């Protein structure tokens, strides 16, 4: 797989709030370790890294800036010089100027990881693709949680994750593994 010299690595919403019990059972228990490994490898190539943080306006949300769980998780802490983008919608591109920032740096290829697959990830992938970006979603460096479907059937996090990937694959992004990205960075 070819990775542009200025391809962006984006970590989306990987904050302590995602570990709150309210979310329930999740999939991909090694996702943060994979994100961390990818970040270390990506940084060694001097390609740009962006951290997108959810800044909720909802009362009681763990993602509110005044909540202790608003902070980034230890595995993906930004380094000095890495861009942090705050958002208060599900999309990394609504009201943030992120697409303008990417384009001003000549970035067209975006590697994305984070949470939740069926929420901010799916929304941001669709939006980014509709803006003309080449999105590559690192499926095993994303996760989600169990969810009840429209018919009242409890779906496992694995099922929810797989359906989101199926919704996105081909039309909105290329689905890749962490290992493929790591191998391609060499």
Image (cartoon, grey):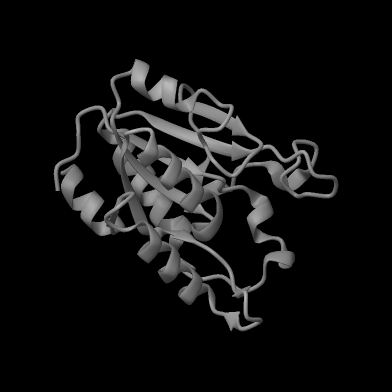
Residue lying at the far right of the rendered structure = 59
Q: Quadrant of residue 19?
A: bottom right
The correct choice, above or below, for 26 with respect to 55 in the image is below
Q: Position of residue 157 (x, y in %)?
A: 53, 73
Give left or right: position of 156 versus 2: right
Give left or right: position of 116 versus 19: left
Give left or right: position of 32 versus 48: right
The one nearer the camera, 108 or 142, is 108
What residue is shown at x 31% (from left), y 58% (from top)? 169
Q: Position of residue 141 (x, y in %)?
A: 41, 57
Q: Position of residue 177 (x, y in %)?
A: 28, 59
The one nearer the camera, 52 or 92, is 92
Residue lying at the far top of the rendered structure = 104
Residue lying at the far front of the rendered structure = 151
What residue is shown at x 48% (from left), y 30% (from top)? 79
Give left or right: position of 58 versus 174: right
The correct choice, above or below, for 84 with respect to 112 in the image is above
């Amino acid at each position: 797989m070819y990775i542009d010299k200025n391809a962006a690595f984006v970590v989306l919403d990987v904050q302590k709030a995602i570990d709150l019990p309210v979310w329930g059972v999740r999939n991909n228990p090694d996702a943060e370790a994979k994100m961390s490994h990818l970040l270390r490898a990506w940084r060694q190539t001097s390609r740009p890294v962006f951290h997108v943080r959810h800044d909720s306006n909802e009362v009681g949300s763990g993602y509110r800036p005044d909540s202790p769980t608003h902070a980034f998780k230890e595995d993906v802490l930004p380094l000095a010089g890495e861009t942090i983008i705050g958002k208060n919608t599900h999309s990394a591109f609504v009201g943030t100027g992120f697409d303008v920032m990417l384009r001003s740096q000549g970035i067209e290829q975006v590697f994305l990881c984070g949470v939740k697959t069926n929420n901010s990830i799916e929304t941001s992938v669709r939006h980014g693709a509709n803006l003309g970006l080449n999105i590559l979603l690192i499926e095993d460096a994303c996760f989600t949680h169990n969810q009840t479907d429209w018919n009242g059937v409890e779906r496992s996090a694995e099922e929810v994750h797989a359906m989101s990937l199926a919704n996105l694959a081909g039309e909105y992004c290329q689905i890749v593994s962490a290992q493929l990205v790591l191998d391609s960075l060499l």
